[in-house]
Image: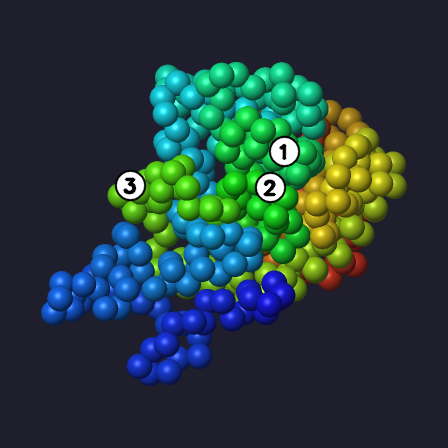
Amino acid sequence: MKPETLAIHASNLVKTATGDVTPPLNLSTTFFRGEDGGYPGGHMYSRVSNPNRSALENTVAKLEYGEDAAAFSSGNTCGLAVFQALKPGSHIIAPDDMYWGIKKQLLTIFNEHLEFDFIDQTDLNLIQRSIKPNTQLIWIETPSNPLLKITDIEEIAKIAKAKNIPLVCDSTFASPILQNPILLGADIVMHSSTKYLGGHSDILGGILVTAKKDELWEKIKNIQQTGGAVPSPFDCFLLTRSIKTLAYRMKGHSENGKIVADYLNGHPNVEAVFYPGLESHPQHEIAKKQMKDFSGMMSFLVKGNVETAHKVVNKVKLFAQATSLGGVESLIEHRYSVEGPDSKTPKNLLRISVGLEHIDDIIADLAQALG
Ligand SMILES: Cc1ncc(COP(=O)(O)O)c(C=O)c1O
């Protein structure tokens, strides 16, 4: 089945006594055992699994062409689980433009247990040169947050496979509709489901999908089920509901995104626009090869300085000046001030998540804010 169909039907597989067409919310934390001591309903205890989480994991695994999925209580917890699954002393090759919250995990939680290098992963030779005997993971993020850098998943997968190093791809900015890293050779794909999967800025979650149930995956599943940083049944229920419209929301985000990127690109008060759908984007050809469309995520440099950038975000009326992304409503954010003084993000950079409002209203708001 095509993604549009899977997104609607993959979570509806549970047959209930009441014949529900959509999966009901199942809040039970514990499940009856059968006379033989087994679990006839397929679930034992809701930290380990529950019907709503299984429906979610099954749906996203299918959308990402993977064998299995593990849902977590946030996108960051996905990072935590992958890093915890590595042997102490392992080396990780990570992107220089890595989502700062996951980068912060490496710098502040795993700094005594793991080694890591943050490198420009658009340079394939640099990736090759950065591999060490103890390299146990290549983590990529494409498109990256906040500079929208594109890394070539297929080429990096070849490098990783040749050295038997697992490749994990944070594909949050693309969603499973626009990019499927497993089909391009990645071992695990990660999404902050807080973003496009949820789509309404009201659920915190994360999900990992694996190409195969190997040793690393068994460790990650154990961390999920024994560690217990799992989403609630209600979060899973909301997510499976949101995912039903994901394909159509991504069409709308991408359509509006392109128009906004073109508008900003031609604006006299804008110095540069980072959007993989623009021909001027340095990795536009790679983006075209591995993405079906380019979403509503972009960032741009305001002509001027940090004060000029702050003036713009303080002037918007329709856009919400707030962090996060992927919701139906348009958001704008000054990234440097969120990431803090160690951030390498330019001080005049604004990141926007283009929502699903009418494009004329979105452009009118940007026009009045940019002057
Ligand atoms: C690319 C990317 N990865 C991971 C995360 C972390 O997700 P969460 O906020 O759900 O923990 C984010 C959050 O902004 C993100 O943008």
Q: Quadrant of the N terminus?
A: bottom right
Report the side of 327 relative to 31 (left or right).
right
Which residue ends up furthest to the front in the rendered image?
162
The residue wearing badge 1 is 158
Helix, strand, or loop for circle 3?
A: helix
Kind of residue at badge 1: Lys
Kind of residue at badge 2: Gly
Q: Quadrant of the C terminus?
A: top right
Label disc, if present, on residue 185 of the rendered structure: 2
The residue wearing badge 3 is 227
| Residue 203 higher or lower than 297, as above or below | below
Report the side of 40 relative to 128 (left or right).
left
Q: Are marks 2 and 1 in contact (CB under 8 Å)?
A: yes
- Indicate which label's residue lies in the foreground, 1 or 3: 1
Image coords of residue 327 (percent x, y): 58, 54
What residue appears at the point 42 percent right and 46 percent down from the top-left corner?
213
Quick check: can you spot residue 126? yes
Helix, strand, or loop for circle 1?
A: helix
Report the side of 256 relative to 232 (left or right).
right
First of labels 2, 1 by sequence position:
1
| Residue 130 higher or lower than 78, as above or below | above
What residue appears at the point 22 percent right and 59 percent down from the top-left corner?
44
Disc 1 crowd rating (10 Å Cα; few below 14, some 14-19, many 20+) is some
Helix, strand, or loop for circle 2?
A: loop
Q: CA distance from mark 1 to mark 3?
A: 32 Å
